[in-house]
Amino acid sequence: MAKKGVDIKPARGKLGVLMPGLGAVSTTFIAGIEAIKKGLAKPIGSLTQMGTIRLGRRTEHRVPHIKEFVPLARLEDLVFAGWDVFEDNCYESALKAGVLERSLLEQLRGELEKIRPWPAAFDPYYVKKLNGRHVKRARDKFELAEQVIEDIQRFKAENSIDRMVMVWCGSTEIYLKPDEQVHDALKSFELGLKTNHRSIAPSMIYAYAALKLGIPFANGAPNLTVDIPAMLELAAQNNVPIAGKDLKTGQTLLKTIIAPGLKARLLGLSGWFSTNILGNRDGEVLDDPESFKTKEESKLSVLEYILQPHLYPELYSNFHHVVRINYYPPRGDNKEGWDNIDIFGWLGYPMQIKIDFLCRDSILAAPLVLDLVLFLDLAQRCGMRGIQEWLSFYFKSPMCAPELYPEHDLFIQLMKLKNTLRYLRGEELITHLGLEYYD
């Protein structure tokens, strides 16, 4: 445990927030920040803005807000920019996304219209359901990365930006497995950029550009992106924190809440059937089998890691786990997730749990983007680099060191996050042992 905490640089100046993809999630996030700054709404769902943290013994009654405990950037200091395959400014994109009411967007119109996307580094091979024309042209992927870097440097200079964070808010790409030929080392990855290697997707180009400039990167989609040795090497080389992957919002959020409860009570699982209907751009992209494969891999891994069937074979070794996503345009961004959970208890008697979660995908995602921006900026000011496993709380497929398994239990993830903050400030880590109250 840290005796005196960690030296944390102050959060002075403007913090640039870079987002590949200015669609439903990004515009809901940006509009939300502007609404909160104007006093039109509250930052509900954001741990950094509304969460508290207990310090010391329960009898001490020290429970500050997280934003008062650690030096986070202020919302007033955030400046937004991004890329998209469509030319719509942030106001137009938010209207088309249909997440927020027009009456609210009209009050934010001036701020949102100023944010216009730069042409995207895009290739329809990796996202087959999108057909935007607002794209960059280049000889090879290395030149595309150079163009992304130029966008970032120009944005920094024109807006007097002090620090930056990049969060991938773009679409789910086709399923890619790590390629030893190009992903295992930074040198081979850069050669792959120059030779247009098929195993380098657009999201990797953005991540490379960010890490090359020393900008923290969070992967909000299930894409491979920074989850390869070459990116870990670059992050270590330039002392940059990274996190990912796939923002934990609707159905998987509930799985990471319910599955730990079943395991805690040692209730068995026979099967878990999950299906979604979704009508936004994300739903359209996932209607392509190759993009769905990427999302499916992310969603399916959760239960295996939480329930640990190798430790509890009688309870969890043979359960059936099925995930479906159905593109249904009338639903828009208001996703509906149905879950049928077949469990068994004492003496093997069967029971069932039924869930119908009518959620709003981007409403759940927006506060996660905010927290990741602020926490990654904090991590960099603390001198942290590489995978930030303490931010697993926010992801469906949390990144971790190669020799570890990812922690999916939401409650363990929250404990890890808060204990990291306590460690940074030199506070005692909380174990919840509690015996000291009764000695």
Image (cartoon, helix red, strand yellow):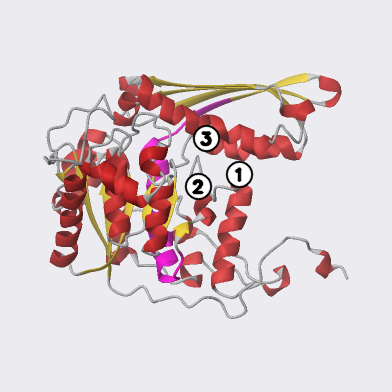
Label number found at residue 252: 3
Image position of 20 with respect to 57: above or below: above
Task: Identify the mark nearer the N-term, 1 or 3.
Answer: 3
Give the residue at the far right of this rendering.
Answer: 439
Say which element carries label 2.
Answer: loop
Q: Residues within 10 Å of mark 2 (few under 14, many from 20)?
A: many
Say which element carries label 3.
Answer: helix
Task: Identify the mark nearer the N-term, 2 or 3.
Answer: 3
How far across and how far down the image is residue 213, in percent? 27, 61
Whether residue 372 appears in magenta in the rendering, the answer is yes
How far across and how far down the image is residue 76, in percent? 29, 66
Label number found at residue 405: 1
Give the residue at the far bottom of this rendering.
Answer: 4
Q: Amino acid at mark 1?
A: Tyr
Q: Is residue 384 left or right of residue 38?
A: right
Q: Which residue corresponds to the image point at 16% horizontal and 47% vertical from the top-left?
A: 143
Distance (Cα) linking label 1 and label 3: 18 Å
The magenta segment:
355-384
Q: Which residue corresponds to the image point at 69% horizontal and 74% vertical from the top-left?
A: 60
Q: Amino acid at mark 3?
A: Thr
On the rendered image, what quadrant is the C terminus found in? bottom right
Q: Which residue corresponds to the image point at 31% horizontal and 26% vertical from the top-left?
A: 285
Pointers 1 and 3 in contact (C-beta within 8 Å): no
Is residue 367 at all visible to an observer of this figure? no
Distance (Cα) linking label 2 and label 1: 9 Å
Label number found at residue 399: 2
Q: Amino acid at mark 2?
A: Met
Q: Looking at this view, is 64 or 316 the one in front?
A: 316
Q: Which residue corresponds to the image point at 36% horizontal and 53% vertical from the top-left?
A: 217
Q: Is residue 380 left or right of residue 309?
A: left
How far across and how far down the image is residue 387, in percent? 48, 55
